[in-house]
Image (cartoon, rainbow, N blue to C red):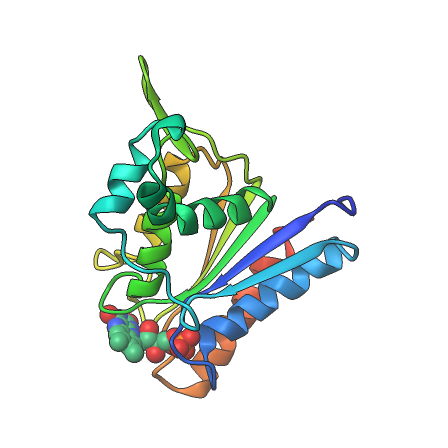
Amino acid sequence: MSTASSRLLRIDASARTDGSHSRRLGDLVEAQWLRANPHGERVRRELTRGAPPHIAEATIQGFYTPPGQLTPALREATSLSDALVAELRAADTLLIASPMYNYGPPSALKAWVDQIVRVGHTFLYDAQGPRGLLQTRLVVLALVSGVPGTLGSAVDFLSPHLESVFKFMGVQRVATLHVDGTSGPADHVEAAMAAAERDAHTLFA
Ligand SMILES: Cc1cc2nc3c(=O)[nH]c(=O)nc-3n(C[C@H](O)[C@H](O)[C@H](O)COP(=O)(O)O)c2cc1C
């Protein structure tokens, strides 16, 4: 059982709100987190209600400019990244609820990733190479796909992408839950959700 200072950041990436399986899976995980952290704080970011813009030339220029040398234009170009990184760093647990779109992440989620993987903030390069700076204790990836057997297979470019990104930023513990076959029979979906819920139960023990 953790302390009152526990904070969960939940990111939802499905473009759907009605009947969204990834939101349902996210809810199951969030409920387990809440059981373990009854006094914890929760912050939720709906990416498809306000998808982050793609990073632009000025954003990248701003990322690689020392803070003291930022012009007002570069400051503006990196201000959303500042806010998203601060939101991420304030949480000790991150939950991402996302579908697979075309074998990979929804573009809104990829846009968010491009805003938060940031030199000097969430990683840096030193003489030994790249080093992660993120202190997030646990990242839970709650992932769904329509076709059975897709997640965890050779054509899953969603789970390994997200796992690699968070490991690159220094997160030691990344737990991935899969519910696939959401376009198929309801009994398959129910069984997969029940199995994921059992797995979620052990995450925050
Ligand atoms: C644009 C789009 C692309 C999709 N691409 C894939 C895919 O590559 N593989 C797959 O198994 N399912 C794919 N699906 C199915 C979704 O992953 C599935 O319907 C999932 O349940 C959607 O998440 P949601 O229920 O939270 O909205 C796709 C769905 C959409 C809308």
The image shows residue 185, relative to residue 94, as above or below, that is below
Residue that extends furthest to the front in the rendered view of this protein: 72
Q: Position of residue 183 (x, y in %)?
A: 34, 83
Residue that extends furthest to the top in the rendered view of this protein: 127
Q: Residue at x 51, y 79 (%)?
A: 190
The image shows residue 98, relative to residue 88, as above or below, that is below
Q: Is residue 34 left or right of residue 73?
A: right
Q: Which residue is at the front of the view, 122 or 177?
A: 122
Q: Which residue is at the front of the view, 85 or 185?
A: 85
Q: Position of residue 28 (x, y in %)?
A: 60, 68
The image shows residue 88, relative to residue 15, as above or below, that is above
Q: Answer with the quarter of the image where residue 78 lies.
A: top left
Q: Residue at x 60, y 46 (%)?
A: 91
Question: Quadrant holding ligand 1?
Answer: bottom left
Q: Is residue 92 left or right of residue 130?
A: right
Q: Residue at x 34, y 71 (%)?
A: 145
Q: Residue at x 38, y 71 (%)?
A: 180
Question: Can you see residue 120?
Answer: yes
Q: Position of residue 51 (x, y in %)?
A: 37, 66
Q: How many marks?
A: 0
Q: Position of residue 63 (x, y in %)?
A: 32, 37
Question: Can you see residue 178?
Answer: no
